[in-house]
Image: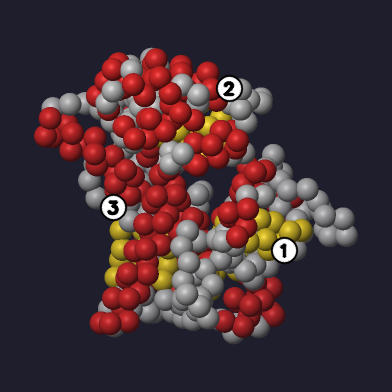
């Protein structure tokens, strides 16, 4: 049995951060009903999985990003700008446990589907809001995506190389840190409801989640008046510490040396035992002052070896080292395979797709995706018919009015 079986979540999220939260809840067994605007999915997109022969050729059902972020969910379309759409949503809220949304405060309040409206049919409903900058303060109505939060939080300031300007991480941390925090907040609020009978409006602002990652820099400035800045792959106390070029095209290895014993182990492994006795590199402080020299020494050794070969040699000597893995290597990684980290589930129109399970395991409980992402409007019969008891005629009326769709507008 999955931990959240029996819990129903309404997913009103957009972009990445909100869907990360609800996909994790779905992985844990919650029934997640995704309510998306009728025109939310683009008809064509560069990010599309190949067409599987024998299935309808509908690119909007094979969006790779959508497929990853909405695995294991059900999906219906509703135009929430229409009174009829809001009425259906409130009926669905009355039989659900929580709603998760990441619109700006003015949008959800302006639509008339805020906390007070949702709790009218279900007093113990939990609403989890994920505004970019919070529901109050001068920036409450400002819109932002992951890159903007990375910048506003100071993470971009700290990311990059000393001789260059700030950089955003390749995969925006804000979307994932805030998504995980919002999922945790949802579970906490549901636990509170189960103990007290009280629902609540939870605020899980993206900026709040991202600031957890820069606490050391804030503390350093507060206590030492020192402004941390970009250091590339350098570490204040470890050297060597970085990512070094290896044999092969665009192949790399990460190495981190924690203490003098590990430095001696590195010297012997790379065939330079005399460096272990060199006073210039005698301790952590002296090595930190000669970081560039040490990086050059390590690079001269790694360039002649494949990343996995070099990592194995250093690991055998007790030094933290790892090949920088490509995406194809991740999918074939024996360690991930042994731990069942990659779940392959079948998508109705894209075939088998790999998904990462939740980043933890539970004894006797499954915490990975068990179904692919829903096709456009796929949940119409179940949600509107089975859950809400609508007749075929009532569902058809919603479609005729353009409030809901089960066929993509094209």
Q: Can residue 351 be seen from the camera position used here?
A: yes
Q: Which residue is identified by label 2?
A: 303
| First-in-chain label (3 vs 1) | 3
Residue that appears at 13% across and 34% down: 222
Q: Which residue is identified by label 1?
A: 346
Q: CA distance from mark 3 to mark 1?
A: 39 Å
Q: Give the left or right position of residue 334, taking residue 256 as reference.
A: right
In x, y percent, where is residue 190? 35, 74
Residue that appears at 75% across and 63% down: 348
Q: CA distance from mark 2 to mark 3?
A: 52 Å
Q: Which residue is identified by label 3?
A: 135
Neighbourhood count class around disc 1 (C-alpha, 10 Å): few under 14, some 14–19, many 20 upward: some
Q: Give the left or right position of residue 394, taking residue 164 as reference.
A: right
Q: Can residue 170 be seen from the camera position used here?
A: no
Q: How is the image coloured?
A: secondary structure
| Local secondary structure at mark 1 | strand
In x, y percent, where is residue 141? 33, 45
């Amino acid at each position: 049995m999955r931990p959240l079986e029996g819990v129903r979540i309404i997913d009103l999220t957009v972009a990445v951060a909100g869907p990360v939260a609800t996909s994790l809840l779905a992985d844990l067994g919650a029934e997640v009903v995704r309510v998306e605007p009728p025109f939310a999915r683009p008809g064509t997109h560069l990010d599309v999985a190949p067409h599987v022969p024998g299935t309808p050729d509908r690119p909007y059902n094979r969006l790779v990003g959508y497929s990853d972020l909405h695995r294991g969910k059900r999906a219906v379309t509703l135009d929430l700008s229409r009174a009829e759409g809001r009425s259906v949503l409130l009926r669905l809220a009355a039989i659900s446990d929580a709603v998760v949304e990441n619109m700006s405060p003015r949008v959800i309040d302006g639509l008339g589907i805020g906390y007070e409206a949702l709790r009218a049919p279900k007093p113990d409903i939990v609403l989890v809001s994920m505004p970019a900058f919070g529901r109050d303060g001068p920036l409450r109505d400002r819109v932002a995506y992951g890159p903007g939060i990375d910048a506003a939080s100071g993470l971009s300031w700290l990311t990059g190389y000393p001789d260059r300007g700030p950089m955003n991480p390749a995969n925006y941390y804000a979307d994932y840190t805030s998504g995980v925090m919002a999922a945790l907040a949802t579970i906490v609020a549901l636990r509170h409801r189960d103990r007290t009978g009280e629902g609540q409006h939870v605020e899980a602002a993206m900026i709040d989640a991202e600031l957890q990652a820069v606490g050391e820099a804030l503390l350093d400035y507060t206590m030492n008046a020192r402004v941390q800045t970009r250091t590339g792959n350098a570490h204040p106390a470890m050297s060597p510490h970085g990512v070094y070029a290896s044999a092969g095209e665009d192949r790399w290895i990460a190495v981190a040396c924690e203490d003098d014993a590990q430095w001696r182990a590195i010297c012997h492994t790379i065939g330079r035992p005399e460096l272990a006795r060199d006073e210039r590199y005698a301790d952590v402080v002296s090595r930190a002052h000669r970081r560039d020299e040490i990086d050059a020494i390590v690079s001269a050794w790694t360039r002649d070896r494949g990343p996995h070969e070099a990592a194995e040699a250093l690991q055998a000597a007790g030094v933290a080292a790892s090949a920088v893995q490509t995406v194809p290597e991740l999918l074939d990684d024996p360690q991930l395979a042994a731990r069942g980290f990659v779940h392959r589930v079948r998508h109705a129109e894209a075939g088998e797709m790999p998904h990462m399970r939740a980043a933890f395991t539970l004894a006797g409980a499954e915490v990975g995706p068990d179904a692919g992402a829903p096709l456009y409007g796929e949940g119409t019969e179940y949600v509107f018919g089975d859950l809400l008891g609508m007749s075929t005629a009532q569902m058809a009326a919603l479609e005729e009015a353009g409030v809901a769709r089960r066929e993509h507008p094209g």
